[in-house]
Amino acid sequence: MRIKNFRVAFRLSAILVGLLVLMMTLLFLVIDLKPDTEILLLVAIMLLLFFIFSVFLINYRIERFILNKIKGIYNDLSPSGVSMSQQIVQSDMEALRESVQKFADDKKLEIETLKEKEDYRKEFIGNISHELKTPLFTIQGYVLTLLEGAIGDKNVREKYLKRTAKGV
């Protein structure tokens, strides 16, 4: 990755130096200045120094830009409460890709586990609901029978009240 960044910095610096040479040439033509050998040598040395400086500066800025983007990704993906000083920020894109893939796989597994737990919870609540409704409906049936007139018959009343008490 660093070699690729260095190539980009080298090309951008070459473009900058080329533009600078073009501007200086146009300046010499417009002013109609005939530079001697010493001035041309001085300009060439300055251009070389500018080129070297710009290569390293652009490379540094590219590296910082990528590193800041990677830190942002780590901050987004890291668990809350874990600071960046506790993590090793990797500038190697392949290692970052593997790290993000592992994170995605872990989250996928976590989602599957949560779905299984949700299904279990739904089934459990359904079973509890069924187990509670059955005796309640039985009690409701006994009470309705008693209210509809069976309350006057002492044998039926005691029989249904005992069943109701047993159902609870």
Image: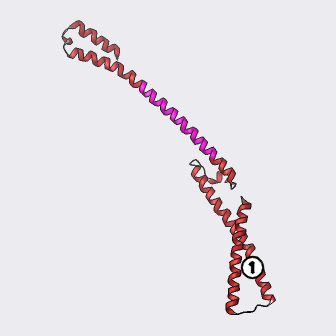
Magenta region includes residue 111 = yes
Name the foreground residue: 108 vs 20: 20
Q: Is residue 9 above or below residue 20?
A: above
Name the foreground residue: 88 vs 10: 10
**SS for callout 1:** helix
Residue 4 appears at what percent x and percent y? 72, 61
Residue 77 appears at what percent x and percent y? 58, 49
Bin the neighbour count of mark 1 within 10 Å (Cα to Cα): few under 14, some 14-19, many 20 and up.
Answer: some
Q: Where does label 1 land, which residue? A: 47
Residue 160 appears at what percent x and percent y? 27, 11
- Residue plotted at (71% across, 72% down): 13
- Residue plotted at (31% across, 20% down): 137
Magenta region includes residue 86 = no
Q: Is residue 35 left or right of residue 128?
A: right
Q: Is residue 98 above or below residue 165?
A: below
Name the foreground residue: 30 vs 131: 30
Q: Is residue 79 left or right of residue 143?
A: right
What amino acid is at disc 1? Answer: Leu
- Residue plotted at (68% across, 88% down): 27
User: In which quadrant of the rendered image does the C terminus lie?
Assistant: top left
Residue 159: quarter of image: top left
Q: Is residue 135 above or below residue 52?
A: above
User: In which quadrant of the rendered image does the N terminus lie?
Assistant: bottom right
- Residue plotted at (75% across, 79% down): 47
The overriding secondary structure of the stretch rendered in magenta is helix
What is the image's colouring?
secondary structure
Residue range of the region highlighted in magenta in the rendering = 101-127
